[in-house]
Amino acid sequence: MEDDEDRSCVGASPTAQSDLPHSVARTQNSGKINCSTEYEQILVEQCSSTEESSERAQDPGSISSPCHHYLMTTKELQLYWLKEKHERKPVKLLFEIPSTRIAEDFLSKFVVYKIIIVSTGSFDENKVFIERRYSDFEKLHRNLLKDFKEEMEDVLFPKKILMGNLTEELIRKRILALKDYLAELYTISCVRKSKKFMEFFTKPEEEEGYSCLRGGEYGRATELFHQVVCLKERLTLHCPAVVVPSMCALVVCHKDMDNLDKAYEVGMKALTILEKHTGHRYYVPLLDTLISLAYKIGKDFMSLRERLEKEERKVKNIEHMSVSLKELAVQECIE
């Protein structure tokens, strides 16, 4: 019999020490932070930005608007629409379940499904996988129905079987059913963009990663956050800023393990995402950390310092406190 009890990973949370000098002042809430509290806010900001870009693209006077079609030759017109079709083609995901394993707790045995998410249309070198049991799928389905009951009225979820659920035949059938289930969910726009859908694939690993970070297990935390970042990059193309906290946690891990070049590389990638979200709570701490990293590894830190000073001038009359990137990261996912 499969146990429906959902288990979570809870780690110790010792007081974090700042990884950077407190000479840089910045605004920040001092309360504990849940890893998903900003998802909706970031999504709204990102969608607004996307709509504005779309409106500009449709404006005939826009710089990005194409040249007049009547000036094109037939070949040029064909090439133009081919390019447009290619650029607008959405990136799709495939949900594969290549294998399973039988696990056991103090109550019963159950099946654990290995799930791989693959991006189609290009070579996907970062193949990461997660493991979930039937009760995790069942919980996802219940949670999604609370928000998207009408949209999911035609989505079939494999029924629970109390006896004989460990047979090879049933496991094969359930693999196919669960693959189809995830694929159907992904075709529903509001579902695939929802926080609940993303958290099914990332939340357990993310919570364990922050627990390891707080406990100083940086090697294990690095593995987990790399996995989470790869998954979020696939699942949140509509809202890239959602991946920033996990990327910053990865920066902290690499920095504390003296992998400075890797920390700088990941940090600059996160900073690129935040260029349109300079009010994001991670923006200033990330800039401060990158200045320190760039100085140590011989990169250009002056341009980063200029950006930081620009942000400081914006908040100079606001009561604030100094918070490092590490202090910010260890507060995540604390209930």
Image (cartoon, rainbow, N blue to C red):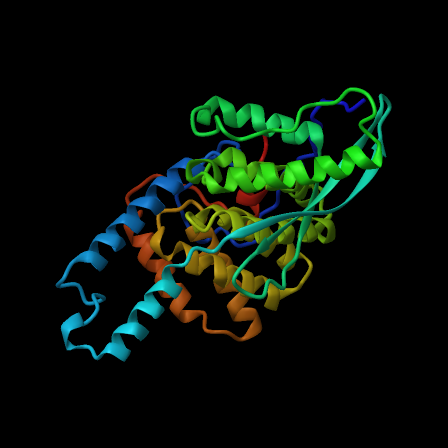
Which quadrant, please, contains the N terminus?
Answer: top right
Give the left or right position of residue 302, taking residue 297 as reference: left
The vertical placement of 201 against 311, above or below, is above
Figure disc tally: 0
How far across and how far down the image is residue 37, in percent? 47, 34
Quadrant of residue 261 in the image? bottom right
Give the left or right position of residue 324, taking residue 273 as reference: right
The vertical placement of 49 against 196, above or below, is below
Q: Nearer the viewer, residue 301 or 142?
A: 142
How far across and how far down the image is residue 43, in percent? 39, 41
The vertical placement of 22 against 77, above or below, is above
How far across and how far down the image is residue 219, in percent? 73, 53
How far across and how far down the image is residue 23, in percent? 46, 53
Point 20% across, 65% down: residue: 65
Q: Is residue 332 visible?
A: no
Q: Is residue 328 visible?
A: yes
